[in-house]
Image (tube, helix red, strand yellow):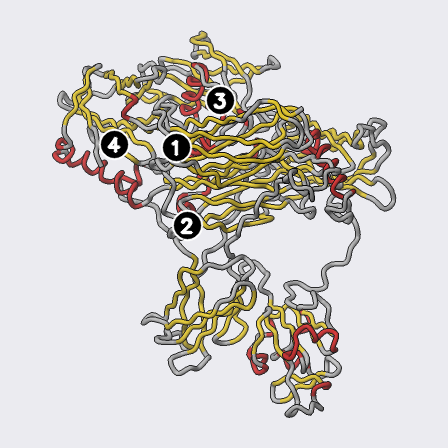
Amino acid sequence: MNRRLLILFPIIFLVITFGFIQEDEPLKKIISQIEKYRTDYPQEKVHLHMDKPYYAIGDNIWFKAYVVNAEINELSALSKILYVDLINDKDSIKQSLKLPLNLGLASGDFTLTDSLKEGNYRIRAYTTWMRNFGEEYFFDKTFTVGNSISNAILTNVNYTFSKTGNSERVVANIQYTDMEGNPLSSKEVNYNVNLDFRDIAKGKGITDSRGNVQINFTNNQPFILKSGKILTSIRLDEKTAVSKSFPVKSTSSQADVKFFPESGELVNGIRSRVGFKAVGADGLGMTVSGYITDKGNNKLTEFKSEHAGMGHFRLNPLTDEIYTVHIIFEDGSEKKFPLPRVLPRGYVLSITNTNPDKLIVNIITSENSQPDAKFTLVAQTNGLINFVAKNKLQGQSFTAEIPKSRFPTGILQLTLFSPTNEPVAERLVFINHSDFLKINLSTTKIVFDKRENVSLMLDAKDSKDKPTVGSFSVSVIDETKVPFKESAETTIISNLLLSSDLKGFIEEPNYYFTEINEDKIRQLDILLLTQGWRRFEWKNILSNSFPNLAYQPETNMEISGRVKASNGKPVVGGKVTLFSSAGDVFLIDTITDVNGEFKFQDLNFSDSTKFIVQARNEKDRKNVEIQLNRIPTQLVTKNKNEAMLEVNVNRSILPYLQNSKNQFDELRRYGVIGRNIMLSEVKVTEKKPILKYSSNLNGAGNADAIIKSEDLQNCAFISQCLQGRIAGIIVSNGIVYSSRSMGSSFGGPVPMQIVIDGMMVEPEFISSINPQDVESIEILKSGANTAIYGMRGGGGVLVINTKRGEVSRDYRSFAPGIISYNPKGLYKAREFYSPNYADPKINSKMADLRTTIYWNPNVVSDSTGKASVEFYNGDGTGNYKAIVEGIDINGKIGRQIFRYSVK
């Protein structure tokens, strides 16, 4: 790697060779440790471009994934598999996809089925390799999902807070109305308050004449219980009760203000810049102003916040002073906060980032250094060293300029090392060369008719105006029905260059990349002054304490494990066979190595595929144990973007939901979708499913008799529980027969076919199955139930369903030498449906009320940088918005928005 290294003099640069690092052993160690981290622990980032910012029950979520190498933002060649989870507001995974990555790209979709509830959802995306470095760096986006199918009630909740001692009291005022805004008066409301998954209050109330009900509760453990939800059920009539839930982001109205001295510490006698961040109880920034006083109550400086509750002020701190920050809120109230302690000695690294072409570096110290003592400044972007300089302090300060051209676009980390090579100060700045892809979108005109064909042309160029080949995703939405401000979007630029490198919640990260001006440049600098960030800790790196790699990059799909004998020793030279019992067809075998290990690599199977793994020892005996290597499921932690939770979900996107309801009514009217849709809001009394995990081809529970797991508790063998319990079942020498087959004229009695988790096995296997592993047994004797199994069902069928659906039960060993395994397979993305109104078969009478007009995740520009797509408008009038995101072959990213009108 070519490194450009500089000795700094005040406002002067001298380019020198790499040799001085080779001669400086301590500095050489620092550089080598950073290089080791970069090469041995390469980082990946993930971005998902979603077709729109919010959804309704019944919608599809369409997305394209971009997985890049964090160091240079080029498409990652490290991982070949991406995991994408849909998570509800209970931190429960509702759907999960495993997507194949092709050159770091993938596309996928989720269907928001009518079994889901309205609320706040998250989409989380990551690779297995990323799990080594913490969930903080996963893609994680929060969005709202409303209910337009069965929603009959609108709600609005407001919270007021008070405090008595350590207890926090909350009053929730909830209003219930119908869809036309008429209040639901004199209705009984039952409620349950849950904080951090603990029930703390419950009760009931009656709505008043305006549909309002008041819920009061007290949080007596505010240091433990932080947030949660209120679950309510309003009874509309004797038979109907509707459930609604409301997030409780906090049980206090108290704001929190934190202070961040530039480069880390306040140092005695060194005038410093101090950033601050004021956050409300809801997790969002607050507008504040204030002033600083010393112990004599003298006012030293005044300040006010800028964007998202953040701002800064300057102070010349002294160790013998006591400083108080007086914060004034918008309502006029005032609160006092102490400043961080002042160190008697230390370093301050101050960076001025207002000049578009250069960084101004100012280093000041109160340390008494030796005359020849030298400090070191290291600048890096995502572990890639861009700049190293070593020089003497002129007195106790040093100032220099560094051209920004030496650094790539993104977050730059500058670290100052003392003469003893200890990291003593650090600062983050954002370098923006605006070297994004120039994506030009155009149509033949700017005003179209309803259902008119539109040809959208794309012209992609790099920052030097040269055509470039790239991969792009295109979404076209009816903006009149899906309004959303651009600053609140999660974009490929704001995510890959900012959010994915910063820990914690960032309020509206795309704000800093829309309509950029001097104010936003300064505000972005303040964000980096206040936002905590560390991909690694210096003390760990310098002490050679690198992260423990629990996960390796997934470059292919494989099934592996080891085979052990009954005495625990590895089976060497044993035969292992892998075959499928459902889904894609597989039949492969291999031999175990000297450690008893086996591996089936380069597999490609869908999510519906189920496997059987069978092993024998070198003497072809089955009395062996199979242990599979499995990657544990990624846990779901608390939502870091909790501040983005929408309290009044349906009301916040009401125009969108009203259109969605009209669309569903139109689809029902023309019979495109069924009329029987689950009313997910309405509580109904229904029978629980008869069976779990059934593999009965007739459908769960469609059997002549059923034995449940609780009936097997006292059985040593399954045959023991069958004998005498089920009429017409005979057990002879461990083989199960149906009395109907005992008189068979075809060569004697025919044993019942054994089916375990969908896999047909030999009759004698039933004696090897542990009854405690069985969830249920379905006995099929009659011709109506056995016909579907053909000739194999001639003697009857025993469908044995194991407890494989329990947590960590993706595989089951139900007999020696054989196990079932249901690994997650690859998902194949569906194709977005876009009507072709040139086709006379299209129903022209049905209203086209689509909100996503067009989606295409696989648009590739040619060598001239050009590409085009075609689609038809819907019946909605107003502004249509085309959003394009993508990356070219050189790792440059871009985003563009284009609007046209439909009349």
Residue found at the far top of this picture: 298
Label 4 and label 3: CA atoms lie apart by 39 Å
Label 1 and label 4: CA atoms lie apart by 51 Å
Q: Nearer the viewer, residue 586 or 256?
A: 586
- The residue at 41%/34% (across/down) is 501
List the residue tagged with mark 2. Answer: 80
Label 3 and label 2: CA atoms lie apart by 33 Å
Compared across the picture, whether 754 is left or right of 430 comes to: right
Give amino acid for label 1: Thr
- Residue 864: give its label: 1
Q: Are marks 1 and 2 in contact (CB under 8 Å)?
A: no
- Image quarter of residue 654: top right
Q: Secondary structure at mark 3?
A: loop
Question: Could you tell which of marks 1 and 2 lies nearer the N-terminus?
Answer: 2
List the residue tagged with mark 3. Answer: 514
Give amino acid for label 4: Glu
Q: Secondary structure at mark 1?
A: loop
